[in-house]
Image (cartoon, grey):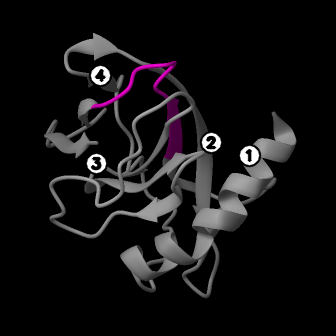
Amino acid sequence: MYCMNKRLITVLGVSIALLLGAHTASAASAAPLSQVKVLKVESPGCGFEDIAQGQEQTRCNHSGPNIKVYVLEVGYGRSAHVGLDGFEVNGTRTPVCAFDNGNLTECTVGKKTVGYLYVFDLAGKQEGTFTFSNTSINAPGNTLSTQLYIK
């Protein structure tokens, strides 16, 4: 699991840094959710497909086993709700942290978590509408969501 998470952070580090720009962590209370975004979809047939802001469906035909979806959540949410065509999917989450230069990376002791990188395994599901939503743990209690049709 550790090697997969380390590879995951390496693969997505540039995407996250570009997405968030030069934001730095503060010592204040937990930040409310400010963004959720599907970053990539991975499959044996297509490899990693970057998902652009506002993209509604994958360009590549990922259908087949072993599809994974990578989601970035900035801020702190209560409990993510995730599904493919309404059916729950399982995943893992890895904290991401900001350093003084604004780049996000895997968290180490003494660094502040600014969000999470989720990896969802579609567990043999072939295609459909992937949805992700979460609600902030603190004010303003906002709910953010994203969806993507995976073909």
Residue that badge 4 annotates = 83
Query: For the residue labelled by badge 1, is the local secondary structure a helix, a strand or a loop?
Result: helix
The residue closer to the viewer here, 57 or 108, is: 57
As helix, strand or loop, the secondary structure at mark 3 comes to loop
The kind of secondary structure element at disc 2 is: strand
Residue 75 visible, this orientation:
yes
Q: Earlier in the sequence, mark 3 or mark 1?
A: 1
Tag nearer the camera, 2 or 3? 2
Mark in front: 1 vs 2: 1
Q: Position of residue 76 (x, y in %)?
A: 39, 42
Q: What whole-number distance in Å separates the C-alpha atoms at marks 3 and 1?
A: 22 Å
Q: Are marks 1 and 2 in contact (CB under 8 Å)?
A: yes
Q: CA distance from mark 3 to mark 4?
A: 19 Å
- Circles 3 and 1, Cβ within 8 Å, touching? The answer is no
Disc sitting over residue 5 in the figure: 1
Q: Residue at point 16% right, 36% down?
A: 141
Residue numbers of the magenta segment: 117-127
Can you tell which of label 4 and label 1 is closer to the viewer?
Answer: 4
Q: Position of residue 55 (x, y in %)?
A: 19, 62
Q: Is residue 133 visible?
A: no
